[in-house]
Structures are given as C-alpha cells and as structure tokens.
Image (spheres, helix red, strand yellow):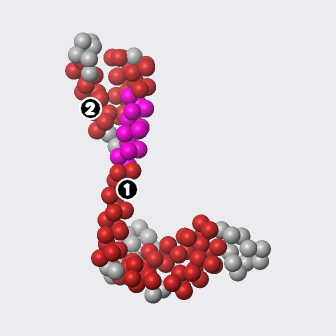
Amino acid sequence: MNPEVDDCEKVVEALQKIFACRLLDETVEKLLDELKVLTGQETSKAVLMMWLEWRNAVKKLELNEQACVVLKTARSKRLYCKSRKQREIIKELFDIGFGLYEPGTKCDFQRGAENAFMYGYLMGMKADGVTAVKGGAA
C-alpha cells in the first residue's frame, strides 16, 4: 500500500473488511463503492477480481481439508477393505447406472459412478452408525 495515497488508513480499512467477508453481498458492494470513491474505478475492479480469486482459492483449500478428513475416516473404518469384498454389487450398481440393461445402451458413465458412489456413501453411513443425515432422507 502506497502511504502517499490520500486517506490511506480508510483504504486499508476497507480492504481488510472486504477480505474478511466470505460472500459477495451488500456489505462487500458497499465497501467496493467506498473504495471506488477513495481510489478510483480501476482499483475497485482490481480489488474485486483479487477478492474473487482469493475466495476461490480459500474454497478449494477448505474443500481439500474436508476431503482429507473424509479419506482419513474411511481408512480408519477400513472402508476400502470392506468395499473390496463388495466388488460384485458395486459393479452391478455401476452397470445399471451405465445403462447396460436398457434398450439402446446409453453409456452414462456419470450415472454409473453416482450409483457406485451412493452405495459407498451408504456403506460409510452404516459403518459410522448413522441412520439418517440431518436434512436428508432416512
């Protein structure tokens, strides 16, 4: 930050508040408008782009951390070993989603993967002793 900028403290304060926000909402818009008045349109646009890139990076990091916790839990409950014993049913679930039994095979790899994933998810829920997910079906 260039200390020779007029109202340097206000600019720094606005930037700190912008980067403390998790969502692009009215608060951020007001802060960007304030920043535009203090520094100009180009700076406001540049800060918005930096904020968007920063938020995407933070979201990716948070998602990665959550995924690592899930994998650690799966390993601790030996879900990989248990799923190897279920290969036939997993393959059958994939084939059903893939469209193997429908006339004019659809070859829907995504649907097959979703079926296999759902079975794995249910296995994990069962291993964890969970009968229903808050906000989900029992």
Sort mark 2 into few (<14), some (14-19) or many (20+) by Cα contacts within 10 Å: few
**What residue sits right under mark 2 in the picture?**
16
Label 2 with label 1: CB-CB less than 8 Å: no
Q: How many marks?
A: 2
Q: Position of residue 40 (x, y in %)?
A: 39, 16
Q: Quadrant of residue 67?
A: bottom left
- What crowding class fits label 1: few (fewer than 14 Cα within 10 Å), some (14-19), or many (20 or more)? few
Nearer the camera: disc 2 or disc 1: 1
Q: Position of residue 70 (x, y in %)?
A: 35, 67
At a point 50% along the width and 72% down the height, the residue shown is 117
Q: Nearer the viewer, residue 132 or 18?
A: 18
Residue 50 found in image quarter:
top left
In the rendered image, residue 15 lying in the magenta stretch gets the answer: no
**Which residue is nearer to you in this view: 115 or 68?**
68
Q: Residue at x 24, y 27 (%)?
A: 13
Which residue type carries mark 2?
Gln
**Which disc is residue 63 wearing?**
1
Residue at the spot 73% in from the left edge and 73% down from the top edge:
105
Q: What amino acid type is highlighted by mark number 1?
A: Leu
Which type of secondary structure does the marked residue at label 1 adopt? helix
Q: Position of residue 48 (x, y in %)?
A: 41, 31
In this rendering, is residue 54 above or below 99? above
Which segment did they paint magenta? 47-59
The answer for how far apart the CA atoms under marks 2 and 1 are is: 24 Å
Residue 129 spot, x, y in % from top left? 33, 82
Q: Is residue 75 visible?
A: yes
Q: Is residue 69 above or below residue 94?
A: above
Residue 120, above or below 42:
below
Q: Residue at the location (26% across, 17% down)? A: 2
Left of 1 or right of it: where is 117?
A: right
